[in-house]
Image: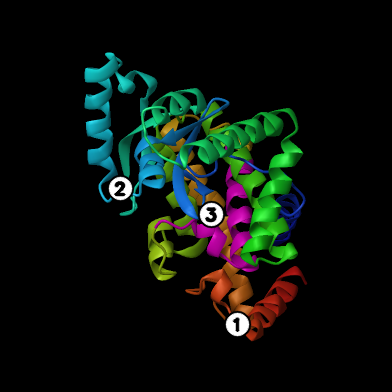
Amino acid sequence: MDFHINKLKSKLIKLAISLDCMDADEEKTHIAIFNGKAIRRKLVGDKWFFSVVDIIRVLTDSLDAKDYWYRLKQREKEGSGIELSTFCRQLELKSGDGKEYETDCADTEGIFRIIQSIPSKKAEPFKRWLAKVGYERIQEIENPELAQERMKDIYEKKGYSKDWIEKRLRGVAVRQELTDEWKNREIKEEKEFAILTNEVSKATFGKTVEEYKELKRLKRENLRDHMDDLELIFTMLGEAATTRIAKTKDVRGFEENKVAAKQGGEVAGNARKELESKTGESVVSEENFLDIPEKLKKKRKKMIEAFNR
């Protein structure tokens, strides 16, 4: 039995570190940067939808962008009879408190119309930036490798090592395969995806995603962007194992997938505990990846080498 379990671990690790692609939809709320300021956006189908209040905040420097948006709609309706809200749709975007709220969003075409009503010197460069973002998305659809290269470039500029970046992107592929499998096995609700993800995380690391983020002192940040190599490897292992179990057992519905998620996480959790027993050090780290001193990075590298042996 131990031989087969170890063989499975080996196969799953090889799978997790051999895949190489990027999923633009891994995070529900994405962040774009214009002139150093964040604009929330969400991918719906093949289109980016941008937060209107974020754009107003960038273009007007308003202290109360929501109020500005409210008054802008009133002024436009009175002046031209046009309802700016008709260019929007409500999407759930993550706010500063970490929760998601219904937010007015518009695609590139809608945003172009809305900013025509905003008197701002920044409007023209913003239009060019917006057009560039939209064009890049079209390029990425036609050639997914471009999206991967852009993501690598972003991580490199943030100071991440190339080895870490490779693992991060491979982890995205493993995550995508798992979520696709869940969708094919009758998981539809966002809440269910979150619960299943927590089942894998708890069995792998002994913590839910939120508990892990709290340990690392994170708020809106992406947890996986602050994991080190080992944490990413065990995350991949847990999710790849869950995918394999779901397939081989042909699970259906939320309850069966919940059991499979726990079992998949346990495969990674047992491997993590085995490594910790050999090294005497915890894989679960409270450090943000970029804050880890070079000595500690080398120390963790030795743990990875011990695990691979």
Horizontal and vertical percent position of residue 286: 47, 74
For disc 1, the marked residue is 293
* Extreme-bottom residue of the structure: 295
**Magenta region includes residue 299:** no
Looking at the image, residue 208 lies above or below residue 104: below
Looking at the image, residue 53 lies above or below residue 157: above
Query: Looking at the image, is mark 3 or mark 1 nearer the viewer?
Result: 1
Range of residues picked out in magenta: 220-246
Which of these two is toward me, 158 or 38?
A: 38
Sequence-wise first label, 3 or 2: 2
**Magenta region includes residue 222:** yes
Horizontal and vertical percent position of residue 65: 29, 43
Q: Amino acid at mark 3?
A: Gly
The numbered dot on residue 62 is 2
SS at mark 2 in the image: loop
For disc 3, the marked residue is 265
Sequence-wise first label, 3 or 1: 3
Q: Amino acid at mark 2?
A: Ser
Quarter of the image containing the C terminus?
A: bottom right
Q: CA distance from mark 2 to mark 1?
A: 39 Å
Quarter where residue 74 is shown: top left
Which of these two is toward me, 117 or 88?
A: 117
Q: Is label 2 in contact with label 1 (beta carbons under 8 Å)?
A: no
